[in-house]
Amino acid sequence: MIELEEGILSKVITTRPSLSHKGDYGRILLIGGSENYGGAIIMATEGAINAGAGLITVATHSVNLSALHSRDPEAMFIDWRDKNLAKSIQKMDVIVCGPGLGTSDFAKIVLKTLAANISSDQVVVLDANTLDLISQDLSLLPQAKLIFTPHQMEWQRLSQIKIPFQSDTANLVALKNLPNSTDKILVLKSNHTHIYDQSGKIYVNSTGNPGMATGGTGDTLAGIIGGFVAQFGYSMDTVAAAVYLHSLAADEIYRTNYIVRPTAISQKLPQLMKKYSNIK
Amino acid sequence: MIELEEGILSKVITTRPSLSHKGDYGRILLIGGSENYGGAIIMATEGAINAGAGLITVATHSVNLSALHSRDPEAMFIDWRDKNLAKSIQKMDVIVCGPGLGTSDFAKIVLKTLAANISSDQVVVLDANTLDLISQDLSLLPQAKLIFTPHQMEWQRLSQIKIPFQSDTANLVALKNLPNSTDKILVLKSNHTHIYDQSGKIYVNSTGNPGMATGGTGDTLAGIIGGFVAQFGYSMDTVAAAVYLHSLAADEIYRTNYIVRPTAISQKLPQLMKKYSNIK
Amino acid sequence: MIELEEGILSKVITTRPSLSHKGDYGRILLIGGSENYGGAIIMATEGAINAGAGLITVATHSVNLSALHSRDPEAMFIDWRDKNLAKSIQKMDVIVCGPGLGTSDFAKIVLKTLAANISSDQVVVLDANTLDLISQDLSLLPQAKLIFTPHQMEWQRLSQIKIPFQSDTANLVALKNLPNSTDKILVLKSNHTHIYDQSGKIYVNSTGNPGMATGGTGDTLAGIIGGFVAQFGYSMDTVAAAVYLHSLAADEIYRTNYIVRPTAISQKLPQLMKKYSNIK
Amino acid sequence: MIELEEGILSKVITTRPSLSHKGDYGRILLIGGSENYGGAIIMATEGAINAGAGLITVATHSVNLSALHSRDPEAMFIDWRDKNLAKSIQKMDVIVCGPGLGTSDFAKIVLKTLAANISSDQVVVLDANTLDLISQDLSLLPQAKLIFTPHQMEWQRLSQIKIPFQSDTANLVALKNLPNSTDKILVLKSNHTHIYDQSGKIYVNSTGNPGMATGGTGDTLAGIIGGFVAQFGYSMDTVAAAVYLHSLAADEIYRTNYIVRPTAISQKLPQLMKKYSNIK
């Protein structure tokens, strides 16, 4: 078990080559945001934008279009009922599915569409309600490079391991046993988030603070992970750097604020990433 | 009668334990915002978010969804005509009802839904039009731990005490006589807001300024009170600290601004709360 | 002819008495914002809010609701097709009519509703398209205390005086001849805006800059005038102070910016007003 | 081939004469923003506003109205399905067509409307999907003073020159051969953007950075070019100054940020333009 330190940021956040274009930094699709939870997908989107993803599309309920573009004109939009969603999924490098998705029958259809259109060289970040829906029906698990981002109760449902028994050993076994044949990384969110891969590597995150205990913190993290993988590739280190940066930004805010609004975390990212890209 | 001082803030605003999660800081539902007064519920929501409530849901007219999420993606949304409103009410720790509610027939239905689904261990902040509607029909009074936030004219309607006769003694009697069997706190808003509980304790707020004399100041206060109770529990001190903080933030703004926009008050909260959480 | 100087601000912008409430700072209704020009009424509203009006309502096309509340939750809303518009007009201290109103048949109906529901002790600021429509049909002129805010071409249409002949003498005569029996103030906008009343008093504004030559500057001014009259009363000095402050704020912005976004002017107002309220 | 330097800014960005009004700084229409790409036309609009265009109208899908006005009340709106679009086109000095336009059948109708209503003394900036649609049907090319802003793949489609063969000589020939009889300027976007006119003049831009490799950078540039031409007239120097300023603003942001959000570029413009307008 390795405790995450600042060094993970300078390792992962490379200086961009001057000859590059937006395609080099990944195409990312964020899926989520029902009629009731539109803010969640917006917060995830702000994580992805500010983390530096190249091209960002958001598939969400049409009621969320105005608020999304009011805040983030950088994101493209697709109505999640649009039949072109399937085609859109196929073109992406990374898909973040879950923030504000809800657990309606339609949410299941979205997951089926994802599972049916994904290929094994794509990355999927599975967050929030997605994890609950997959717990109920494992056939919804996409055959892709996966990143799971459950909190402990969501992990209990998915892994069948009750929270007090979520030891590293048990978590690693459960991760390996999930019925997909591709790579898997688990980000188990708690006050000391643990990150696991199938090789048995474990990172633990020691940053973070109780000002983050507010709705939207997890949605923002899912977006940041997606943005990092889109740019820096799918790996334990990439995911670990995203987790560490998310908490580091929150710690900076918490120094002078009693609560940490998730949207403030995202705003901090470009400056922090610049700082660590310069330290080699 | 005790004059409120800074000390109330450091007493109430505790340092958050590092092992905590959003559920620990309360589930709050804000109900209000008709087609004409959507801004009011948004301002109340910003009070609650910035005061640190853990999980925030807003029940409002569907026309207000876009503006709400444009400003505050941290809030979840429920159409106040949605039949799930009843279930939603049952799950909450605190409900703030009134900002921009209006006095339509539908507003009465909302109040009936609230009264029918509340239980005595929940807290309800009764603000603005809610007070007028209850004045007309006392059966709408929820059986819960109550916080009333009338200005003097609203209190006149509810208590039947004309403004010139709103003495502390009269107010205390009227508060006790309101026909609910649970705890009651009265925040009687004026240039020197008084706070009463049934035990006869009285706080008076000496902060505040005439730059606050603009629409939305009261809505913001209702949200802050809700956010404080969600985190720090239902008590005279909690409510008093919210009232004091609201004015203190406004006084800071007023030092360099002729008017105090209510939304600016909310933005000041996280920094002020940090300051006072550090003074013990 | 008196050239406006800083002194007009400290004269008009009084220190607010500590015992005061929002009703003391006026009820203002802003009417405008068709499907095509919604931004104009939003900019006028931001002028009025930041100038310190007590209670602000906006009557506009329903498509503008979301953007209005996204920016300015402090404003209340009424659909300008709502039959309650007439009642709303009757309750106001000040009405600003025109920003983004357009010249459709419906715009004429709005003006008729205004003329039919106004009384002689209310103030009406007539801006933008309102002036064109009144030029075509003088029966639309409200019988109220009036403030006209035309630019030179709009004044030509209303006064029948061609721009090269718009001398002070001619303007004063034309102002007096307008067929309403109540008080009238004319703000004739140009690079050196002139302000006239029926007594023959003339102010000229020497501040302002070419960075203000962008759409929305006039809408913002109309809102500021409305906000000033709502607080400080209907008088030449009040109007002159609003005109002067608008340009002064723009000059501060222009010192470091090539263009002056009208919304930036409004944001400057609370600090400038504070400064001048302290100079006595 | 001339490498662009700072001097182009002080040359083009003139001090505004104090006797001027918004009409002097151009009427600009931006056309784009389908249901899926509304953010693109908003970003282009913010480029045009902040670059100082006098009067700005946006023709876009009606779903984009709320987000547009939430961010930019300075812009006027026209539903791009409105039959008045044709008349609106005729009144403009500059039209920017393309950001977020899409390639639907309706997008082609928009282009036909543009081609049918334009005259040879107007300027049209052809951006993004517009270039693809014209590649497929050269009759859609407007007979006006043109500015093309393709990236290399879009230029390949339009010019039939494959990317590796896009030499200055080849590009100049292809530009001249495009079947319109009016002036043409080509802005060929790459890491070192080249600008060509029919006289054979070539500018190359050496500023810019890889933080700009994100969706929306090009949309913003199209808006800035439009805003510059509206104010400073159609010329190679005007276009070159817009290209240079866009990158210069981005370079300033990149110094402290890992990524450059396009909306941040626009916000930088007024201050940079002020600086260079003062250097003569």
Image (spheres, coloured by chain):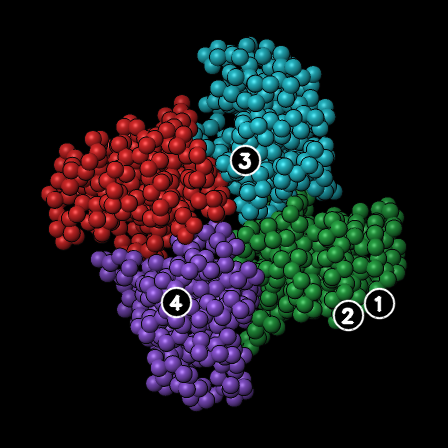
Chain colours: A cyan, B red, C purple, D green
Q: What residue type is labelled 4?
A: Ile
Of badges 1 and 3, the one in the foreground is 3
Task: Report whether mark 2 lies on the same chain as mark 3.
Answer: no
Host chain of mark 2: D
Crowding at dot 1, Cα within 10 Å, few <14 / some 14-19 / many 20+, comes out as: few
Q: What element carries label 4?
A: strand
For marks 4 and 3, give the CA distance: 40 Å
- Asked if marks 4 and 1 touch (Cβ < 8 Å), the reply is no
Query: Where does residue D224 sit, x and y in percent of width and height?
Result: 65, 58
Q: Dot 1 corresponds to which residue?
A: D181
Q: Quadrant of the N terminus of chain D?
A: bottom right
Q: Dot 4 corresponds to which residue?
A: C95
For marks 1 and 2, give the CA distance: 9 Å
Host chain of mark 3: A
- Asked if marks 1 and 2 touch (Cβ < 8 Å), the reply is yes
Give the answer, above or below, for where B89 lies relative to D17: above
- Asked if marks 4 and 3 touch (Cβ < 8 Å), the reply is no
For marks 2 and 3, give the CA distance: 49 Å
Q: Dot 2 corresponds to which residue?
A: D120
Of badges 2 and 4, the one in the foreground is 4
Of badges 4 and 1, the one in the foreground is 4
Please give the name of the residue rendered at 55% of the width and 51% of the height, measured from the top-left corner.
D67
Q: Dot 3 corresponds to which residue?
A: A34
Q: What residue type is labelled 1?
A: Ser
Q: Which amino acid does label 3 sit on?
A: Ser
Crowding at dot 2, Cα within 10 Å, few <14 / some 14-19 / many 20+, comes out as: some
Residue B249 in the figure: left or right of residue C187: left
Query: Where does residue C39 sit, x and y in percent of width and height?
Result: 52, 60
Please give the name of the residue rendered at 54% of the width and 84% of the height, measured from the top-left corner.
C163
Residue D173 in the figure: left or right of residue C37: right
